[in-house]
Image (spheres, grey):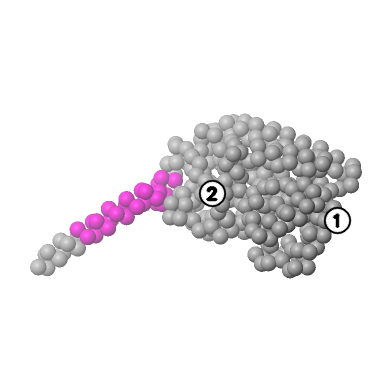
Amino acid sequence: MIRSHRARGVQLISLITVLVAVVCVLLAGCGVARSQSSATGKLRVAVSINQWSSIARDIGGDHVELTTILTNPNVDAHGFEPQVADVAALDTADIEMVNGAGYDEWATRSVRKSGEILVSAAQSAGVHVGQNPHLWFNAHARTMMARDYTAALTRLRPSARQYFDRRYHQWLVREQKLENRMNALRRATEAGSQPDYVATEAVAWYLARDIGLHDITPTGYTQAIQNDSEPAPSDLASFRHLLASHRARLMILNTQEENSMTRSLEAAAQQSRTPIIRLTESMPPRYSDLLTWMNSLVTQFEDAVKS
């Protein structure tokens, strides 16, 4: 009887050992798979949100295996809860690309415990929690993110330095063409009266700033939206007055966060014939990459400013 219990105990221990080994291999959490990936296979890159995925792909090319955690534009990144597979992808990545500034905090909770390299747009651009976190709209943040990501790739795969450098400079040429368009629009707006605008949310604040627009959205309204609370009736009245009086030359509408309040503001803009820039936080599926999306938005701003 005692021998039987011992035999069962040994079998149980052996079974547990096998299961642990299987889980370890599946999740690649034991460190061996990471070192082999860095040495011979493709580098595993995990990107928290789809806005940054195209930079990872454009520069990493054939040397990276890319996983994007949040791709659904209908899911709020602030409250997103990663699933087991998402956590495994983040935990086993050689490079983890995040937005930072509190936008995707869920992606950085376990960073450092597995030794991956973290590339953060917020850190690269010097933006802190409490500041506007929508950094993919920020030309400086995009450039710094690409630079630091290229450095991370080169650090892990120095033999492919020329490959990464070439693709990085190809990306920079496209980014510079976009910035040339924005600079031309900013010079045109600054030559006249700097256009004022209002926004249902401050998602495109960086882009509007880069092209020379001035945000006159009521401060109380903006603070309420940032705190996920209802704006005061007086702030909504001020918002509508800016539209009705034509003080605001255009309105920026985040269609990803529409509700009865934003629809009423949209109606007020339409009634006053104020041009509306409709956009989302996440990159829409119809765009192949971040820079194509940004160029499309700049075109919208050009048309609105000229109208």
Amino acid type indicated by mark 2: Asn
114 and 170: which is toward the camera: 170
For the point 87% across and 44% down, the residue is: 190
Q: Where is residue 140 in the image (x, y as percent from the top left)?
A: 72, 45
User: With respect to residue 249, does 157 lie above or below?
Assistant: above
Which residue occupies the extreme left position in the image? Answer: 1
**Of helix, strand and loop, which mostly describes the magenta segment?**
helix
For the point 53% across and 57% down, the residue is: 80
Q: In which quarter of the image is the N terminus?
A: bottom left
286 and 239: which is toward the camera: 239
Q: Residues within 10 Å of mark 1 (few under 14, many from 20)?
A: few
Reply yes or no: does residue 234 show up in magenta: no
For the point 68% across and 41% down, the residue is: 294
Instruction: Inspect this view and state whether residue 268 appears.
Output: yes
Part of the protein shown in magenta = 11-34
Q: Where is residue 254 in the image (x, y as percent from the top left)?
A: 67, 52
For the point 76% across and 50% down, the residue is: 270
Labelled disc at residue 72: 2
Q: Is mark 1 on a helix, strand or loop?
A: loop
Q: How crowded is mark 2: few (under 14 residues within 10 Å), some or many (20 or more)?
A: some
Q: In this view, does 50 lie to the left or right of 138?
A: left
